[in-house]
Image (spheres, rainbow, N blue to C red):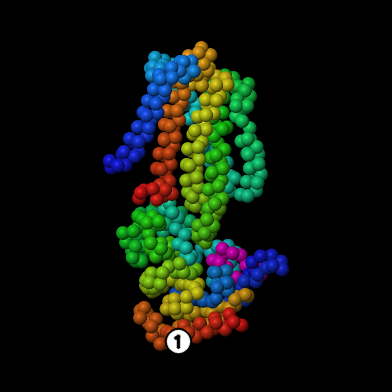
Amino acid sequence: MAYGRGAAAVRAIDEITLGIAQGEFIAVVGPSGCGKSSLMRLISGLHPPLGGSLTVEGKAVTGPLKSVGMAFQNSNLLPWRNALDNVLLPLEIVQPYRGDFHKNKSRYSEKATELLHSVGLAGFTQKFPWELSGGMQQRASICRALIHEPEILLLDEPFGALDAFTREELWCALRDLQAERKVTVMLVTHDLREAVFLADTVYVMSSRPGRIVRRCDVPIARPRELEVTYTQAFQDIVHELRGLIGIKISG
Amino acid sequence: MDRREFGITVMSPAAFVVAMFVVWEIACQALNVPLAILPAPSDVFGALWQYRAPILDNSWVTLWTTLAGFAIATAFGLLLGIAIGWHRAIYAGIYPVLVGFNSIPKVAVVPVLILWFGLGEIPAILTAFLISFFPIVVNVATGLATTEPELEDVLRALGASKLDIMRKVGIPRSLPYFFGSLKVAITLAFVGAVVSETVGSNKGIGKLMLDAQAAFQVPIVFAGLLVLAVLGILLYAATAAIEARFTGWAFRGQANR
């Protein structure tokens, strides 16, 4: 994949092969500008590949996939819809929900309310985005990405704009959601602790052109508590990953 | 509404209006201004009461021609605005023509309209329409053009079509712009209707004032102006109320103040 044209083109991503098993949680980390987000946009189909091919579940990707749910660094909630209606949005777009949305609206609303409850937003379903804190908005945004039961949840630095404490709270919310629903998750982040705490497998990318330089399985048993992030084993993994990224920057 | 709020939103404009009339009255009396130059408010209100039947009759004509022209402008402006915001090519093609058309003073168009449709309500309605659709088009198109690409991405990632994106994001996003432009458009439509009546018609406040002026009935002319001002305020307030009702989310700051 490349941005720009002709000689000025920047090759953002070089050959990358990623394997994600059903129900697996993977994280992609790397220095800023290494093409993490581009990779995610490719997988979601928001960006067509210029050269080569992209296959997801054995099928070539030509346009946005129906089976993905995406959440971004900004919650991107629609300001004219309350939290519940924002979460319901994908059901108004994606088949098969779209076809019977009006008929089953109350059932879907119940489902969305339940989802919002599970991330701690009970009592905030009728609030508009500007009445919610940054962390709450991001919770709602993740609910919106999950409501249509996508095969894979793509998270593009979803906690990047939050303060450290809110971020850790949301790690736990995401961990519980994933454990409960067995969703396949791909998380793009530059926070190594976040990647190691949440993921089963961490991929490290190098920059320009972006390629995977290391695949690292996280051997820490689940369920993981926040305490785990202060253990030696955890620190060692983070340290090792940091080293990989550090070499690539100075080299 | 608490007492302080009531004082600010109701009492202070009322007090200002009364004070304005008092100053006007005193000035006319003290300086002994001739009736034919500037009648005092007492004369104006006297004329308003004395000729209430024809004034009411003609106001009604002006009001409904304004509203008819405004309604056409709203529908047409919304559609054209969406079309222009839909695609850059449509924007590039139509916009220069639109700007050129808008630069033509509408007074100059009225004689043509009278030529085509004869004296009557139709030229007034069409003038009101022609003068007021432009701000609606521009605002709707601006609202669509400035929609955050991130919001569109949310829908595109779900595989939404261009029409879906328009319905779920583009149009709701541009509604505050649309309603904002309605406030401008209603005032312009009103101006258009009155201008057309003044140039040539057989009814309406504009026509009434023209006749009164020809007969040196200056208090009636001013009574007409007063009616126009009141109608203008009412029309503006009605549009503003509709705006607040439909796009409350865009004015969130004011609700807490």
Q: Determine which residue is flagged by label 1.
A: A236
* Quadrant position of the C terminus of chain A in the picture: bottom right
The residue under the point 42% across, 31% down is: B234
Magenta highlight range: A41-56
Q: Secondary structure at mark 1?
A: helix
The residue most toward the right is A7
**Chain of the residue on which disc 1 is drawn:** A
Instruction: Depth check: give the residue in front, B210 or B145.
Output: B210
* Quadrant position of the N terminus of chain A in the picture: bottom right
Question: Can residue A246 be found in the magenta stretch?
Answer: no
Q: Is residue B256 left or right of residue B34?
A: left
Look at the picture and state if B203 lies above or below A7.
Answer: above
Magenta: main secondary structure equals loop
Q: Is residue B162 left or right of residue A221?
A: right
The residue under the point 57% across, 84% down is: A247
Q: From the top left corner, tell me how far across and down residue A118 is, in percent.
A: 34, 66
Q: From the top left corner, tell me how far across and down residue B52 is, in percent.
A: 40, 17
Q: From the top left corner, tell me how far across and down residue A170 is, in percent.
A: 39, 70
Instruction: Depth check: give the residue in front, A28 or A236.
Output: A236
Quick check: can you spot residue B84? Answer: yes
